[in-house]
Amino acid sequence: MSTRHVQSRPGFTMIELIVVVVMLGVLAGAVIPRMMRRSDREAEQNVRVLADFFSTAAARAAIAGQHVALWYDATGDGRMWMETSRAASASDFETNPVWAPDPIVPEQRADRLTFVSGSVDGRALDNRKWTIEMVPGQERGMVIASFRDREGTRTWSIVLAPGSLRAQVVEGATPLDESVDLDATGMGEVSW
């Protein structure tokens, strides 16, 4: 009786290879979109931090009674900072407006965003550098600052209504009119 010895070759079968390729495809289909959404979430978070920054400046001017200015410089990664007046009185400010960086509020960066356009009470802001002054006792005009993500796929506008202490983030195109949801800005009880 002769016994036949079948020698097996080391390697993978075709079915094993197909299973591995399918598994890699499923894994890639789950991971790649998540990685793409991560940059979207980071840009949106960056906009919300900047909106809080606008709100802080408005509250500082209204509550503390200080002259406040928001400064923006698009060079580099879009540095934004707040300065307050060191003048002793309003008359001193008119003759010698001395600004100094605010020691309490840290500067912010629009490092995930590009400034697109903006306006204060209808006056356009420069795309490279701008300053928004908030003077206690004077009505602040409508402030709109629009940003888009670095990929250019999403746009947000930060809207700070006159008299409001809370900036609102509006996703999508730049608002063409100056209408604002009073409830969303914390002014729901104000008569209009």
Image (cartoon, rainbow, N blue to C red):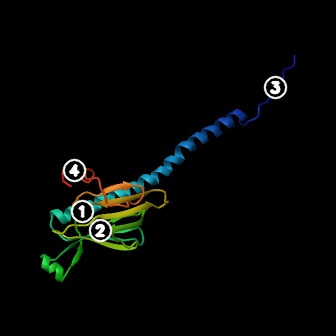
- Residue under the image location 17 percent in, 80 percent down: 94
Q: CA distance from mark 3 to mark 4?
A: 88 Å
Q: Can you tell which mark lies on residue 109?
A: none
Q: Can you tell which mark lies on residue 121?
A: 2
Identify the secondary structure beneath mark 3: loop
Q: Amino acid at mark 3?
A: His
Asked if the residue under mark 2 is in contact with the one under mark 4, i.e. CB atoms within 8 Å, the reply is no
Which residue was labeled with disc 3? 5
Work out whether residue 163 can be spotted: yes
Decide: is 37 above or below 115: above
Q: Quadrant of residue 43?
A: bottom left
Q: Amino acid at mark 4?
A: Gly
Which residue was labeled with disc 4? 188
Which residue was labeled with disc 1? 162
Q: CA distance from mark 3 to mark 1?
A: 91 Å
- Left or right side of 27 for 126: left
Asked if the residue under mark 1 is in contact with the one under mark 2, i.e. CB atoms within 8 Å, the reply is yes
Work out whether residue 50 can be spotted: no
Q: Earlier in the sequence, mark 2 or mark 1?
A: 2
Q: Quadrant of residue 15?
A: top right
Identify the secondary structure beneath mark 1: loop
Give the image location of residue 116, x and y in percent: 42, 66
Give the image location of residue 175, x and y in percent: 37, 59
Q: Amino acid at mark 2?
A: Asp
Which dot, 3 or 1, sits closer to the camera? 1
Most distant residue in the top direction:
1
